[in-house]
Structure formats: structure tokens, C-alpha cells
Image (cartoon, rainbow, N blue to C red):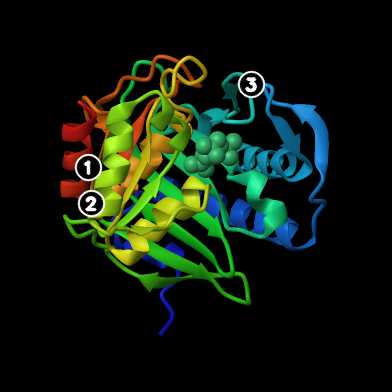
């Protein structure tokens, strides 16, 4: 018997409104998936606020998600990695409402090479993001568009994987993903940082001396998904000042939702000092160094990068 996303959310104790919201997110992912098969892979001719070139697909994925979050009327505040500021929507304010932060197409520069990319979502109850921590998220979702399209979600009761089938349903493929404490794979982001940070160079050497297996695609959505599916691994993205004094990856759109998904699978994540999920959001586009994956591997990184 197929286990559908909708009934899994229900059986997992989801409030109806949160379940509807996640189903709208899944719907957006199906449309994005379709565009990836059929759509324009070229440049949009525009840049985001950080001067990064946008692809037609970045812009389209952003629109598809924004429209779905808007029409469901459950979301008051939305912030996208592709937008400068928060968007306020018409929601049913008298009832339980949500705020959603998302990265519409993480790793989109990989799209022309046909490597996997993803859409990442962080869902909070109530209105707005500033001053809150990742601990306040009520759900996180990561959709990976690869040879198959898969969706991971957590609502704080485990991390579960679904796969999109031919008739457009996400069906359960793995319940309660589990990370071992010890990693054997490493996904070292931002090797440029090793030029200015000898500790990172030593950490890289440690992994090589210990004969870890390199598994790094350059797309965080796929790299974290790899760790979760293989049941072990460590992903790092340290800072490299002056260009990225806090690293490149964003707290709201990437680090928080992945930290929630990984913690719910028994792993952990840190910025080198505190857990990512304990960081206070001060700015929508705030960046943070991140070390995430198997618990003991994260501890080792913190110790060596101190
Ligand atoms: P994006 O959201 O613009 O796609 O950037 C995030 C991506 C991550 O998926 C990945 O880990 C990182 O950028 C790699 O960046 P770089 O190759 O610049 O080190
Ligand atoms: Mg991204």
C-alpha cells in the first residue's frame, strides 16, 4: 500500500493547517520539477541583491513558490533568498498563521551540468523571522531534483523521505532517517578558506589521513541529502574573510532548515561556537559558518577549528 505525503503528515500529528501548507509546498515542487524538465536553462538577465546572476529558472522557481504560498492563505510572512525583503501576504490572521523562509533553487549554477539541485523551506508558526531562532521552526522541507525528485520533511518527529511518482504523488520511501555518530564521508565546502586558515587545512588533512571518502557536489541541498541518505557524513562551509567573513550560506534559507532535518535524524550542526538552531536571526540574509552532519564528526570539527 502506498503511503502518501498527505496521510503521513496527518498520521504524524500535523495540525490541518500545517499539513495544507506543506502540501502547497509539495505542489510548488512538482511545478518546479516540470520546469526543470522543460524550461529555459539560460540567464534571466537580472541579478539578485548580492550581484549574483539569476537564471530564468531561479526567477521562475521563486514565482511558483511565492504564488503557492500566497494562494494557500496560511502564510503571513514570506522571505525568499532571491528577494531583498520580506513579503507580507493576505492570510487568515484570526487563525493560526505561518511564516516561511525559502531558497527556491539551491545550487542552481549546477543546473546546466545536470547535477542535482534543490528547494529548501523553513516554516515558523506566527509572523516574521527577526529575533527568532531555528528552534522555533515547526517544520522544514528539502526537495531534491535529481534522477528522481525526492522530498524530505521534519515536523520535529523524525525526518522522512518521499519520492515523486509518475502520477504526481509524493510517496514514502524512507521513514525516520538516522545518522550514525561517526562519519566516513566528507563534503568540504569553501576550500579557498584553507589558504588563510591553517586550521581548516589541518582538518582537511586529517580527513584525508583517516581515508574519509570525498562526496561533494557543490550544491548543499544534494550534499546534505547525501549525508542523510547514507546515514553518515560531515559537511563544512567555513568563513573566508574578507569576502565571506561569516561564510556564504544563509541562516534562514539554508542552515536553519538543514539543521532541523539533520538534528531530527540524530545529527547536529554548529557555527563553531553554538548550535546553528540557537542562533538569533538578526537579518533576513544573515550568513553563518556551518559544520553539520554526524555528531562526533561535528565535535571534531569544532575542536580542530577552535
Ligand atoms: P546558491 O543558494 O546561490 O545556490 O548558493 C549556495 C550554494 C550551496 O548549495 C553550496 O554549498 C555553495 O553555494 C557552494 O558555493 P561555492 O562553490 O561558492 O563555494
Ligand atoms: Mg542556496
Judge by depth and name the residue closer to the eye, 118 or 270.
270
Q: Is residue 230 left or right of residue 287?
A: left
**Residue occupied by mark 2:** 294
Above or below, 32 against 253 in this view is below
Q: Position of residue 256 (x, y in %)?
A: 37, 35
User: How far apart in space, not on screen, are marks 3 and 2 (Cα)?
Assistant: 32 Å
Sequence-wise, which precedes: disc 3 or disc 2? 3
Element type at marker 1?
Answer: helix
Q: Position of residue 44 (x, y in %)?
A: 81, 37
**Residue occupied by mark 3:** 50
Sequence-wise, which precedes: disc 1 or disc 3? 3
Q: Is residue 85 visible?
A: yes
Q: Residue at x 55, y 31 (%)?
A: 91
Q: Residue at x 35, y 25 (%)?
A: 197
In the figure, residue 62 lies in which quadrant? top right
User: How far apart in space, not on screen, are marks 1 and 3 (Cα)?
Assistant: 30 Å
Above or below, 224 against 47 in this view is below
**Residue occupied by mark 1:** 298
User: How far apart in space, not on screen, are marks 2 and 1 (Cα)?
Assistant: 6 Å
Q: Position of residue 268 (x, y in %)?
A: 23, 43
Q: Is residue 23 left or right of residue 13?
A: right
Is there a contact, CB below 8 Å, between mark 2 and mark 1?
Answer: yes
Amino acid at each position: 500500500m502506498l503511503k502518501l505525503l498527505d496521510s503521513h503528515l496527518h498520521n504524524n500529528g500535523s495540525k490541518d493547517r500545517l499539513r495544507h501548507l506543506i502540501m502547497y509546498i509539495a505542489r510548488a515542487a512538482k511545478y518546479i520539477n516540470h520546469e526543470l524538465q522543460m524550461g529555459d536553462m539560460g540567464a534571466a538577465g537580472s541579478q539578485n541583491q548580492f550581484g549574483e546572476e539569476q537564471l530564468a529558472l531561479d526567477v521562475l522557481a521563486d514565482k511558483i513558490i511565492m504564488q503557492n504560498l500566497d494562494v494557500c492563505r496560511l502564510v503571513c510572512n514570506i522571505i525568499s533568498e532571491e528577494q531583498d525583503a520580506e513579503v507580507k501576504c493576505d492570510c487568515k490572521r484570526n487563525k493560526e498563521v505561518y511564516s516561511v523562509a525559502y531558497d527556491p533553487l539551491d545550487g542552481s549554477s549546477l543546473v546546466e551540468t545536470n547535477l542535482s539541485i534543490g528547494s529548501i523551506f523553513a516554516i515558523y508558526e506566527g509572523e516574521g523571522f527577526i529575533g527568532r531562532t531555528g528552534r522555533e521552526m515547526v517544520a522544514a522541507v528539502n526537495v531534491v531534483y535529481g534522477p528522481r525528485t525526492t522530498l524530505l520533511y521534519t515536523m520535529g518527529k523524525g525526518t522522512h523521505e518521499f519520492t515523486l511518482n509518475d502520477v504526481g504523488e509524493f510517496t514514502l520511501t524512507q521513514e525516520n532517517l538516522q545518522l550514525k555518530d561517526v562519519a566516513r564521508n566528507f563534503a568540504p565546502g569553501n576550500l579557498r578558506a584553507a589558504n588563510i586558515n591553517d586550521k581548516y587545512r589541518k582538518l582537511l588533512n586529517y580527513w584525508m589521513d583517516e581515508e574519509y571518502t570525498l562526496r561533494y557536489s557543490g550544491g548543499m541541498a544534494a550534499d546534505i541529502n547525501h549525508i542523510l541518505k547514507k546515514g553518515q557524513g560531515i559537511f563544512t562551509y567555513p568563513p573566508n574573510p574578507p569576502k565571506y567573513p561569516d561564510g556564504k550560506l544563509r541562516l534562514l534559507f539554508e542552515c536553519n532548515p538543514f539543521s532541523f532535518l539533520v538534528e531530527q535524524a540524530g545529527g547536529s550542526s554548529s557555527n563553531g561556537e553554538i548550535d546553528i538552531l540557537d542562533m538569533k536571526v538578526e537579518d533576513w540574509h544573515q550568513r553563518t559558518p556551518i559544520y553539520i552532519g554526524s555528531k562526533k564528526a561535528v565535535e571534531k570539527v569544532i575542536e580542530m577549528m577552535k
